[in-house]
Image: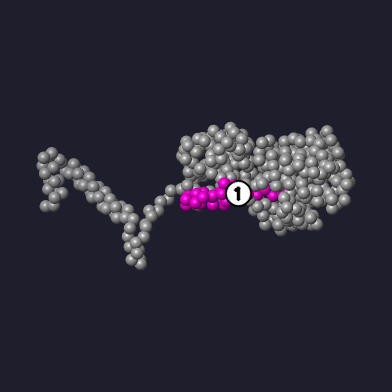
Amino acid sequence: MTGWQEIEAAFIKKTHFNRKRQSSFCFVVCVFFIVAAISLVLSGCGQTDGPDTDGKKTDKVQITDEKITVGLSQIGSESDWRMASTASVRSAFSSAAGYDLIFDDAQQKQENQLKAIREFIDQGVDYIILDPIVETGWDSVLSEAKEAGIPVIVYDRRIEVDDDSLYTCWIGSDFKLEGERACVWLQEYLESSGVDRNINIVDMQGTPGASAQIGRTAALEEAVMLNKNWRIIAQDTGDFTTAKGKEVMVDWLTKYGSDINVVYAENDNMAYGAIEAIEARGYKVGLDIDNGEFMVVSFDSSHNGLQLTLNGKIAVNTECNPLYGPRLTEIIQTLESGGSVEKETYIEEEQFSGISYIGTIQVRNHPYTVTHLTENIISDRQY
């Protein structure tokens, strides 16, 4: 009789178990043996040092299926650009790639972004990614994220905080450079076309306080100061949307009519609205200012925006690249491996026009290519 059998017999004799209880006891004993066996196996798997196939010692790391949890606060879905940006990020942070993505659409309200970030903190995410609606008002909530030990990655639009250690890094566009490139192209076009007259410009601005609005507006205002024949006759926000862009353009047409020469639309969706309003009033959109056509300058270089550029309804379209997903995952993987990342990173962007004779412009003492559009270029693009 084994030791366990002696124990069982003694225990049964003492307590007068019936057969049913004996069976229960045997079940417990079996469970005990199974647990003990598993424990022995796990203790063996937990060894960190052991010979590999070459007889050398190696560090064996236990592999788990834990995912990296990321909270993403997106501005909204106000434009083609925004939707392309969201799709890029959501695709990159997929479950198959090893991520749990918690996505929040702020519907273009900063208070919704502040609430979302605090919810991410409460949920204990590993990283927070923020595309901020406006630049200011982030100090308090990002201080909370820092106290919780959660890195914050800002992309696309910028933020202004008293302490830049509140966020890990920023990656995005040089919005003022975009505006400068558009204005230099306009200057080159007017000079090469022999247009020697006063140019009346309406500035259809993006969301007030957004980085894109600040940079693109500043570039236009500085260009007007440098070109004595240029003047801004109206500025108003189209809030980066087609509907609001159309509404603002209708108002300007009522006030200024054919006195308008150039519509400086700070994104493609507002340009769509402006073009629709102009044509609905019986005016023409194109490059021939001297014959009364309205020239439209735009930004983003979305698929539909480039099609209008190829057709001559947008004179020049300066790219704002929305494909941030792969860049953001690179940042997180670098941080996960213990590496460091640049505090600020600008992404490279292109510029497009349907005319071919302005192939290069000079901005900030640097040459920039202006790509002559074709159908193939548009069809090959990702957005």
Give 248 or 189, whichever is nearer the viewer. Answer: 189
* Residue 76 highlighted magenta (yes or no): no
* Residue 338 highlighted magenta (yes or no): yes
Q: Position of residue 208 (x, y in %)?
A: 68, 35
Residue, x 11% and y 40% (percent of image)?
A: 14
Residue, x 70% and y 55% (percent of image)?
A: 378
Residue under label 1, please give it.
345
* Tag 1: amino acid: Thr
Q: Position of residue 95 (x, y in %)?
A: 50, 49
Q: Position of residue 156 (x, y in %)?
A: 62, 44
Give 24 or 317, whichever is nearer the viewer. Answer: 317
- How many residues crowd around disc 1 within 10 Å: few (fewer than 14), some, or many (20 or more)? some
- Image side of residue 233 versus residue 93, left or right: right
Q: Position of residue 258 (x, y in %)?
A: 86, 39
- Image side of residue 35 versus residue 370, left or right: left
Residue, x 84% and y 50% (percent of image)?
A: 191
The segment highlighted magenta reads 318-346
Residue, x 67% and y 42% (percent of image)?
A: 212
Give 243 or 163, whichever is nearer the viewer. Answer: 163
Q: How is the image coloured?
A: one colour
Secondary structure at numbered mark 1: strand
Count of numbered labels shown in the rendering: 1
The image quadrant of residue 282 is: top right
Residue 113 in sight from this viewpoint:
no
